[in-house]
Each structure stands twice: as structure tokens, then as C-alpha cells.
Image: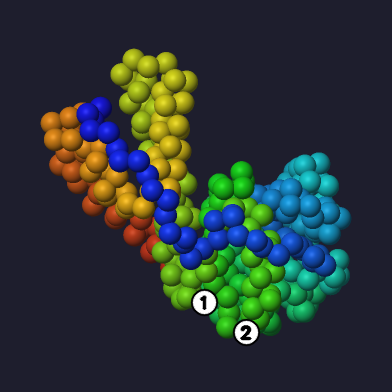
Amino acid sequence: MATQSPTPARPRAPKPSNTGQERIAPINNERISFIGGGNMASAIISGLIKQGMAPRLIDVVEPDEEARARLTAQFGVTTHTSSGPALDASTLLVWAIKPQVFKEAALQARYYTKSALHLSVAAGIHTDSIVRWLGTKQVVRAMPNTPAMVGKGITALYPRSDVAVEDRRRVESVISSTGEHLWVGDEVQLDAVTALSGSGPAYVFYFLETMIQAGSDMGLPREQAQHLAIATFAGAAELARKSDQPPEILRQRVTSKGGTTHAAIASMEQDQMRTLFMRAIHAARLRAKALGDEFGAS
Ligand SMILES: NC(=O)c1ccc[n+]([C@@H]2O[C@H](COP(=O)([O-])OP(=O)(O)OC[C@H]3O[C@@H](n4cnc5c(N)ncnc54)[C@H](OP(=O)(O)O)[C@@H]3O)[C@@H](O)[C@H]2O)c1
């Protein structure tokens, strides 16, 4: 452990994103339909219901019978096996399906959803493709992440220029039920967001797995190793969030030369972990781009 004690964190200047503290308009007069009722849809539905939205105002199109039963039991929402006239009354559609099936699902739903605002969370699929498939320009793309399941997600949003400011606010109202959000100015940036925060929770879990295994190998009971690793991640993230210093400085402050942390960081540097990790994140961005090219082209 380092002998140097970290300088106390100072409060940071406000960030240009929603951090859950700002006032977001309540969800009024909205009837929301989800296309796809898997992990991401469930996270958003859970947030909406916690925020006070009535389950009877939520419809979910989900072909899988087991998933439909779970959605009804867990949330009390109405489910459908496929898109149909039931979607006519929707004011907002949330597209929470895999990129591979988006086109087919969109062509099936387009007849019933022309007057709705559309929010897509599908990785890679461009708004150009969505506009072409749905026949409307009222499209916002989002890249959320799975901490949305516990209200701690971070979502990047990108609106088509045709989406009015008040409709962007409607999207914010929905997505803020899952955590924080920010808007990006260029759609291509969503591939980078996908690689960073969309896939990011898996990187954290990967590091946690490794830390837990190392703790266990060094003789700690597994539950204690897990407790220590998770609390360390949560605590370091909170410190980084609250500090006015970048992570690099926070790291240097706890890495005194000749100390234990220094030994660990030097070992990582020698193994070029930073280069390998950067390469992995770039691989995720390339995959996001490839998904859009592959499944959004026609
Ligand atoms: N999970 C994440 O970390 C994350 C993060 C950011 C963005 N996303 C994006 O969010 C989207 C959904 O991801 P997810 O993790 O929620 O996936 P998921 O759990 O697999 O949910 C997708 C659901 O859609 C259903 N489905 C398939 N074809 C359909 C159709 N034609 N109409 C309606 N529903 C259909 C699937 O049923 P079957 O299983 O029977 O096919 C499945 O239940 C993806 O595009 C993903 O890129 C996910």
C-alpha cells in the first residue's frame, strides 16, 4: 500500500450532462411501446414504473413466450407477440432489439407507428437506416449501459435534426429514469460511446473477476475478496467523480516510488496493459461500426 495519503477531493465544476440532480420534466401523456423486451427494455421499464408511470400505458412486443410471461409478472405491462394495431396509440416507441433483427421488426411496425417519436438503443444501427425503414424522421438514437438496471446507467443520446427540442426533452424524461445522460453532436461518436460506456460495464466486471481471483489465490476467502474488489471499484469511481483532478493525478498520488502500488503499476506497464486495453476498446468501436454497416445497409 502507498504511504502517501491522497489530498482530499474538492468539489468539481458542473458537467455538461445530466447527473441525476437536474430537474427533468415528468412523463406526461405518454404511451410507450417497446419493441423487444429483453435486458435493456426491462431496465427502462423498471425505471419508468419507479418514476410513477402506470404499467397500463406500457406495451411490449416480444416474440419469446417466457420473456412475455416475465414482463407481465414483473411489471404488469401488456405484451404482444408481434407488432399490430395495438401500437397505433403509442406516442413513443423504444427499439430495444438486436441490430440483426431491427430491419425486419421495423418493416413490420412502420404501418402502426408513423406518428410516434422513436428512440433506438440498438448498437450500430444508424438513424439513416431507421428513418428509411420506419418512414419517419422523428428518431433519436441512444447508447445506454446495463447499470441502467439499478438506476445507475449512463446514456449518450443523438437526435436527428428534425426532432424538436420538446421531443428531445420527452426522450430525456424516459432515459433519465435509468440514470444519467448526455447528448453527442455527431452520430459517428455513438460508436465510440458504445465501445466506452455501452460495453464498459463488461470491462469492469472483467477487472473485478481478475481482482477477486487474485485475492482468492493470495489466501483471502472468496466473499471477502469480492467485497474488497467491488468496494474498491465503487469507492475509486466515486472519488474520481467528486475530485477536481483527473484519474491520472489521483493514481500518481497513491503511487509512491518503491511502494506496493508502484510495483503493481510498473508490472502492468511492463506488460503493456494500457496498449492491450486500448486495443480492446478500439475493437469494440470497430464492431459497433461493422454492425451498422452490415445490418443497416439495405
Ligand atoms: N445489454 C447491454 O449492455 C446493451 C447496452 C447498450 C445497448 N444495447 C442494445 O440494446 C438492444 C437490446 O439489447 P438487450 O441486451 O436488451 O438484448 P436482449 O436481452 O437479447 O433483448 C432483445 C429481445 O428482443 C426480442 N426480439 C427478437 N426479435 C424481435 C422482434 N422482431 N420484435 C420484438 N422483439 C424481438 C428477443 O427475443 P429472442 O431472445 O427470442 O430473440 C429478446 O427478448 C441491442 O440492440 C443492444 O445492442 C444493449
Q: Residues within 10 Å of mark 2 (few under 14, many from 20)?
A: few
99 displayed left or right of 215: right
Residue 131 visible somewhere in the drawing: yes
Secondary structure at badge 1 equals loop
Question: In the rendered image, which quarter is residue 287 located in?
Answer: bottom left
Secondary structure at badge 2 equals loop
CA separation in Å, label 1 and label 2? 22 Å
Residue 292 visible somewhere in the drawing: no
**Between residues 23 and 104, which one lies in front from this camera angle?**
23
111 displayed left or right of 139: right
Residue 169 x/y as whole percent:
66, 70
Give above or below for 10 relative to 193. above
205 displayed left or right of 70: left
Classify the position of the C terminus by image quarter.
Answer: bottom right
**Between residues 110 and 188, which one lies in front from this camera angle?**
188
Residue 239 x/y as whole percent:
40, 43
Query: Residue 80 has which mark?
Result: none
Outermost residue toward the left? 258
Residue 189 x/y as whole percent:
43, 70
At label 1, which amino acid type do we have? Ala
At label 2, which amino acid type do we have? Asp
Instruction: Give the residue pinned by disc 2.
Output: 162
Q: Earlier in the sequence, mark 1 or mark 2?
A: 2
Q: How many marks?
A: 2
Query: Residue 297 has which mark?
Result: 1
Residue 119 x/y as whole percent:
65, 68
